[in-house]
């Protein structure tokens, strides 16, 4: 039986600089970009994340990207066009 390979990622908030977490991201399989304030349900998607995702994809073209926070169907469409692999969307 082949050994299991676990993937791990790093959650990044709007307050986290990509440069500051660059070394850790080099080792991660994916990044979870928190597009609104973590822990507070129902917050709107911060449109500054579109640029942040573009910058992330330029810096780490082989890394998978997940996005959580304030995503609705229209935003999800744009995120898929930007190359986002997984989208978290929930309602309370």
Image (tube, rainbow, N blue to C red):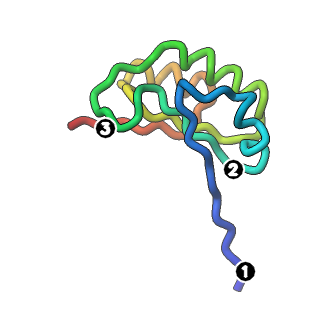
Whole-percent x and y of residue 47? 48, 13
Marks 3 and 1 close (CB-CB < 8 Å): no
Residue identifier under label 1: 2
Hey, which quadrant is residue 21 in on the image?
Answer: top right
Which mark sits nearer the N-terminus, 2 or 1?
A: 1
Residue at the image point whose x is 42% and y is 39% from the top: 88
Residue at the image point whose x is 57% and y is 35% from the top: 12
Spatial CA distance of label 3 from label 1 is: 35 Å
Mark 1 residue crowding within 10 angstroms, few (<14) / some (14–19) / many (20+): few
Left of 91 or right of it: where is 86?
right
Spatial CA distance of label 3 from label 2 is: 24 Å
The kind of secondary structure element at disc 3 is: loop
Mark 2 residue crowding within 10 angstroms, few (<14) / some (14–19) / many (20+): some
Left of 36 or right of it: where is 28?
right
Q: Which residue is outermost to the left? A: 92
The kind of secondary structure element at disc 1 is: loop
Quarter of the image that includes the N terminus? bottom right
- Residue placed most toward the observer, 83 or 10: 10
Closer to the eye: label 2 or 1: 2
Left of 76 or right of it: where is 56?
right
Looking at the picture, does residue 82 appear above or below residue 28? above
Residue identifier under label 3: 90
Hey, which quadrant is residue 89 in on the image?
Answer: top left
Left of 21 or right of it: where is 37?
left
Residue identifier under label 2: 29
Residue at the image point whose x is 62% and y is 41% from the top: 31
Residue at the image point whose x is 20% and y is 37% from the top: 92
Mark 3 residue crowding within 10 angstroms, few (<14) / some (14–19) / many (20+): few
The kind of secondary structure element at disc 2 is: loop
């Amino acid at each position: 039986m082949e050994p299991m390979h676990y993937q791990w990622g790093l959650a990044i908030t709007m307050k986290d600089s990509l440069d500051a977490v660059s070394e850790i991201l080099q080792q991660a399989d994916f990044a979870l970009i928190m597009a609104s304030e973590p822990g507070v349900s129902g917050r709107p998607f911060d449109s500054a994340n579109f640029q942040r995702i573009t910058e992330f994809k330029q810096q780490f073209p082989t890394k998978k990207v997940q996005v959580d926070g304030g995503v609705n169907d229209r935003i999800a469409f744009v995120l898929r066009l930007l190359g986002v692999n997984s989208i978290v969307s929930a309602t309370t």
